[in-house]
Image (cartoon, grey):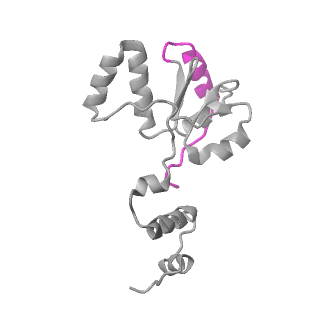
Amino acid sequence: MRPYATALHASSEVKRMAERASGAWCGVGRFGRGTEVLARCGLLEGYRATLPWQRFEAFTQAYPQVTLSQQLFEIDRDRLTCAGGTAAMDLMLTLIGQHHGARLAEQVSEQFVCDRIRLADERQHVPLRTRLGHAPQSLVDAVTLMEANIEEPLSTLELAEHLGISGVS
């Protein structure tokens, strides 16, 4: 099984359950690739939604009737979607703040050792240079090449050749 594989089965039972939950104070929500399940069920037509940045292109092609955003999470009327990962924590803390006050959201955040509650419109994908900090440019270039070839990884020698450095240590 592929890592991060998610069954995108949108059975009629899943759709019925989501429709019944629709309109409740917390709405209907799915995180990460679960956004695709809601879209497949037709529950995101006319809504803004988000999902992990790696899936943007495929999702946009498959579900043009959904307004896709690059936010960490989306709260659009009674639909909740999230980019997954720690963005789910930010969504949860935002909902706690909206329904029970900022102080309780801060206290919950402290319990999870979460240093701050990110806003929905903060960037999903952190640029490589930011992630690697003050690393040498050659390391940034190497990681960029490795990420670009994740499906078919380059050997150490191929990587060295592309970077114009010696593959011998």
Image-quadrant location for residue 47: top right
Residue at x 34% of width, y 22% of height? 105
The secondary structure that most of the magenta stretch takes on is loop
Image position, residue 145 (x, y; %)? 54, 67
For residue 21, side relative to residue 98 (left or right) = right
| Closer to us: 28 or 155 | 155
Q: How many marks?
A: 0
Q: Which residues are magenta?
A: 2-26
Work out whether 24 lies above or below 123: above
Q: Does the magenta portion include 130?
A: no
Residue at x 65% of width, y 27% of height? 44
Image position, residue 95 (x, y; %)? 43, 21
The C terminus appears in which quarter of the rendering? bottom left
Image position, residue 100 (x, y; %)? 36, 13
| Closer to us: 141 or 55 | 141
Residue at x 42% of width, y 31% of height? 90
Image-quadrant location for residue 20: top right
Work out whether 76 lies above or below 90: above
For residue 34, side relative to residue 64 (left or right) = left
Residue at x 39% of width, y 18% of height? 97
| Closer to us: 151 or 145 | 145
Q: Does the magenta portion include 19?
A: yes
Image position, residue 52 (x, y; %)? 54, 42
From this viewpoint, which residue is outermost toward the bottom? 168
For residue 46, side relative to residue 129 (left or right) = right
